[in-house]
Amino acid sequence: MTASILIIGANGRMGQNLIHAATLQTKKPHIHAFVRNPLSLPPSVASLCYSVHKGDALCSDDVQAALTATSATHVVVAVGVPDSNVLSSLRTDSANTITEAISRSNQTVQVVVVSSIGAGGTRIKFSFGLGTLFHFMLQHVLTDHDHQEERFLRFFENDKERLLIVRPTQLTDGYGGDKVILFDGQQKTPTLKVDRRDVSVWILGQICGEGDCFGRAVNITRAL
């Protein structure tokens, strides 16, 4: 069956990379963009989508309508705020809305949540104390990621195979093409940065491939 993937936060940098990554898959999935303002999605990116849906990730009715209209088999949650250091509850609040919409829709969907290393009890451990510095700088956003993960984990508590939490290291743009690795979030962080393109390709591979990492929270970074 062809995967029908609803990307929430499709106009963001991760969302747009996910749309591009879908075009690389042999099993071409149907990509549906969910955005507050469709005009914010560049035409070249929108043209790659099967459909574009206008909606607010903080409105459960909007999310449920998009789930139904797309007959979604998968949802990728890639919401975020432009300033990564600002105090925000967007991820937490949207997690509540999205899980409510899934529950009301009665659809069996698999969900991928793009989180961050440092969330969910993981640690940022890098040379020269950089990990501690980054954790301090990102303390507000990591709290939001923590609460986002907790909400999805509670929702899928009895059906864990439907949830995949992805915690990348610091995300970059324009350096794609590298291999990625999964690593233990309690040990030293292998590399500090990973490109959004490479993370997106890995996520689409999980959705369109064997999906062996569903049911887990994984930490991902650029290979050495």
Image (cartoon, rainbow, N blue to C red):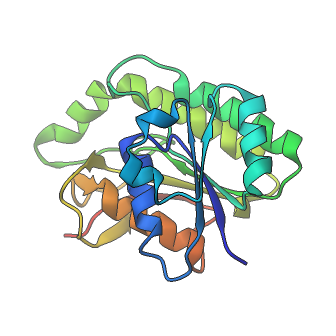
* Residue at 41%, 74% in the rendered image: 24
Which quarter of the picture shows residue 141? top left
x then y, percent, for residue 193: 23, 52
Q: Is residue 33 visible?
A: yes
Left or right placement of residue 178 versus residue 94 in this view: left
Q: Is residue 212 above or below residue 158?
A: below
Q: Position of residue 59 (x, y in %)?
A: 70, 26
Vertical position of residue 106 compared to residue 203: above or below: above
Place of residue 52 in the rendered image (x, y in percent of width and height, measured from the top left): 58, 46
Relative to the observer, which residue lies in front, 3 or 78?
3
Task: Please say if 187 is above or below 100.
Answer: below
Residue 185 can be seen in this image: no
Q: Is 21 in front, or is 119?
A: 21
Residue drawn 32% across the image and 23% down it = 85
Q: Quadrant of residue 202?
A: bottom left
**Residue lying at 28% horizontally and 73% vertically, measured from the top left:** 179
Farthest residue in the top direction? 87
Q: How many marks?
A: 0
